[in-house]
Amino acid sequence: MTIPNHVAIILDGNGRWAKAKGMPRSYGHIRGCENLETIVEEAKDIGIRYLSVYAFSTENWKRSRDEVETLMKLFRSYLKKCLKIAEHNQICFRVIGDPSAFDADIQKSIRTLEDFSREFKEMHVQLALNYGSRDEVTRSVRSLAQDVAEGKIRPEDITSEMISSRLDTAGIPDPDLLIRTSGELRLSNFLMWQLAYTEFYFTDVHWPDFDRKELLKAIEAYNNRDRRYGGVKEA
Ligand code: FPP
């Protein structure tokens, strides 16, 4: 089976999973977070080299204060746990998105994790936190416009590679497979530039129930697609 080099996942359905069990949404997020720990290791074991997960969008601030608080608490503890996960598995973590909106201690944990794991090479995990594709592309274009204004480049010199190289994902290959759990058929502002040639896989399974078996099902479906644009490697 061909293992996709880069898998991106929109983690969806924590709330619905909890509701179906008569539990509060926060319980769904806690279990969703635990599942992320499991799936990172499963993905590594399967041979996936890059994994990008959408954990908090630029739109998620609009959720209730309680829910945002729960998520921030989870990020706090998860980012610390990631240090151990990184060391144990030799995983390089990168946060994509704009961290400046988070409390100072969360921003510090992000920097600590990125610095600590920068040289690890077994796998690359991108955590999308306060991430939105439009925001990311806007920041990239702004930085190019700044260079134009300073006379460093001319507008006609701008290439798509230059835009890519100023995205938060600079240097990371584009995803081969995008998975969205929990039945919604939308991109929700996730990696819109990077997903131009990516295969999409949607499943009704809620994120906390998305296990190794479900991940393998997605990879199997990916293997049954007719891919003309390459970007995959043999297992
Ligand atoms: C989608 O479920 C999930 C989220 C918006 C948050 C995802 C966060 C985690 C899994 C926590 C772990 C992540 C990190 C990096 C610590 P939903 O609330 O949209 O579910 P619903 O659509 O059923 O309401």
Image (cartoon, rainbow, N blue to C red):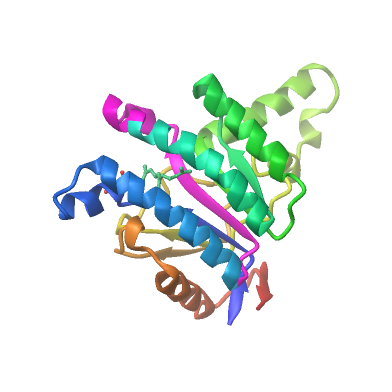
What is the x, y in percent for residue 102? 50, 24
Q: Is residue 92 magenta?
A: no
Residue ranking furthest to the top: 150
Q: What's the residue at 47%, 38% (across, down)? A: 77
What is the x, y in percent for residue 226? 54, 78
> In this picture, which residue range is highlighted in magenta?
47-69
| Above-or-below relation of 63 to 233 | above
Of 3 and 27, which appears nearest the observer? Answer: 27
Q: What's the residue at 71%, 24% (across, down)? A: 145
Residue ranking furthest to the right: 152
| Above-or-below relation of 61 to 160 | above
Q: Quadrant of the C terminus?
A: bottom right
On the image, which quarter does residue 209 sit in? bottom left
Q: Quadrant of ligand 1?
A: top left
Of 59 and 16, which appears nearest the observer? Answer: 16
In this picture, residue 119 sits left or right of residue 70: right
What is the x, y in percent for residue 136? 58, 34
In this picture, residue 177 sits left or right of residue 180: right
Q: Is residue 54 magenta?
A: yes
